[in-house]
Image (cartoon, grey):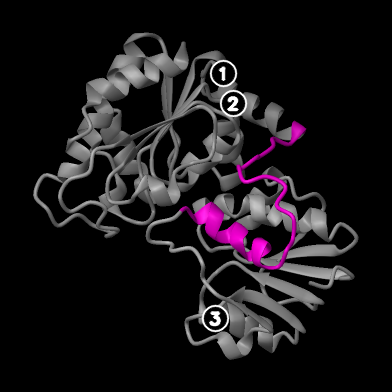
């Protein structure tokens, strides 16, 4: 692979969690092409996330594919290959499939199966097939210095003690099948709040009702911040927590990548494929006969894959992580 590239374009995946799982691959590419000017082409919210990815001085472009000497395509879509081809980028590297092989200059075979193997390794295999050194397989995020003070100011405004902060992400934009039941969350949060932990709920505006449900009966310091923060502000708050409690979601990957204690519940998805990368992670996965269904919404009465995970066990895991 030609290393003399002046303008490098990275096209990250489309979901927050997938971008985090692609971070080791993108980090290795940026270091390999250290002499190049690097740009990321994708959704506007990438601007909030990029300072945490450890990629150095990279520019985010959202409107139109910029000029570049080479583009690495992490999405498997036809659209991403079409955009790179239409943009006139001479080197277009990505996996074949989705009827896009003719649009790529380097159409790589899929040696790993996304249905059974981890997404991080799937993204890293692009580099390995091109003999580009992989610097690290694990996700390693960083917190910009200015974000520390911003997070502390937000927490102080809402009476939250950073030393007692538990962040909770009870939603999942993919769909309800990935959500631990609200009443089970409420049980866990009541136990934590009774021990003096401050509970902060994070999510989108559409998840504010879920936030209210998981706070049912919870007494003590709490803040349902669903819909009240930008992505950058949510990242700032997660960076300061003592514990992240969540489903398989983007903020799960953020917390684990920042080295925060993370307790997460899996049901519709398989942790072998999307588990977070971090040394302080506790996973719960008690599959039912239909797991992992990978469905957006559960069609089985009682959502057994999630109900199999006892709230009492989750409480114990949280308290152990908070010691």
Q: In terms of depth relative to the viewer, which is nearer, 271 or 181? A: 271
Q: In terms of depth relative to the viewer, which is nearer, 277 or 151? A: 277
Q: Identify residue for label 1.
A: 162
x and y percent of residue 219 in the render? 31, 16
> Mark 3 or 1, which is nearer the eye?
3
Measured Cα–Cα span from mark 2 to mark 3: 37 Å
x and y percent of residue 79 in the render? 54, 81
Counting residues from the N terminus, which is met first, the one under dot 3 or under dot 1? 3
User: Magenta span covers which residues?
Assistant: 118-145
Circle 2/circle 1 CB separation < 8 Å: yes
As for residue 46 lying within the magenta part, the answer is no
Q: Identify residue for label 2.
A: 240
Q: Identify residue for label 3.
A: 79
Q: Residue at x 61, y 35 (%)?
A: 236
Measured Cα–Cα span from mark 2 to mark 1: 6 Å
Q: Residue at x 61, y 43 (%)?
A: 139
């Amino acid at each position: 692979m030609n290393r003399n590239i002046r303008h490098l374009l990275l096209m990250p995946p489309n979901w927050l969690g997938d971008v985090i799982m692609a971070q080791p691959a993108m980090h290795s590419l940026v270091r390999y092409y250290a002499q190049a000017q690097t740009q990321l082409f994708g959704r506007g919210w990438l601007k909030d996330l990029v300072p945490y990815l450890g990629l150095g001085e990279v520019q985010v472009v959202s409107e139109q594919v910029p000029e570049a000497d080479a583009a690495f395509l992490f999405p498997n879509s036809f659209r991403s290959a079409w955009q790179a081809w239409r943009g006139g980028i001479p080197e277009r590297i990505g996996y074949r499939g989705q009827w896009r092989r003719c649009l790529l200059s380097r159409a790589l075979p899929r040696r790993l199966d996304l249905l059974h193997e981890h997404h991080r390794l799937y993204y890293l295999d692009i580099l390995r097939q091109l003999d580009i050194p992989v610097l690290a397989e694990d996700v390693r995020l960083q917190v910009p210095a200015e974000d520390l003070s911003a997070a502390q100011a937000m927490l102080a405004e809402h009476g939250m003690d950073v030393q007692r902060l538990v962040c909770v992400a009870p939603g999942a934009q993919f769909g309800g099948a990935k959500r631990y039941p609200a009443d089970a969350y409420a049980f866990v949060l009541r136990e934590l709040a009774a021990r003096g932990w401050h509970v902060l709920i994070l999510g989108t505006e559409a998840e504010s009702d879920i936030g209210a449900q998981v706070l049912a009966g919870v007494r003590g310091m709490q803040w349902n911040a669903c819909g009240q923060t930008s992505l950058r502000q949510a990242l700032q708050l997660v960076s300061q927590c003592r514990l992240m409690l969540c489903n398989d979601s983007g903020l799960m990957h953020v917390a684990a990548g920042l080295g925060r204690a993370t307790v997460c519940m899996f049901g519709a998805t398989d942790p072998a494929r999307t588990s977070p990368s971090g040394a302080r992670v506790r996973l719960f996965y008690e599959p039912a006969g239909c797991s992992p269904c990978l469905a957006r919404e559960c069609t089985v009465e009682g959502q057994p894959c999630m109900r199999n995970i006892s709230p009492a066990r989750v409480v114990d895991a949280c308290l152990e992580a908070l010691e």
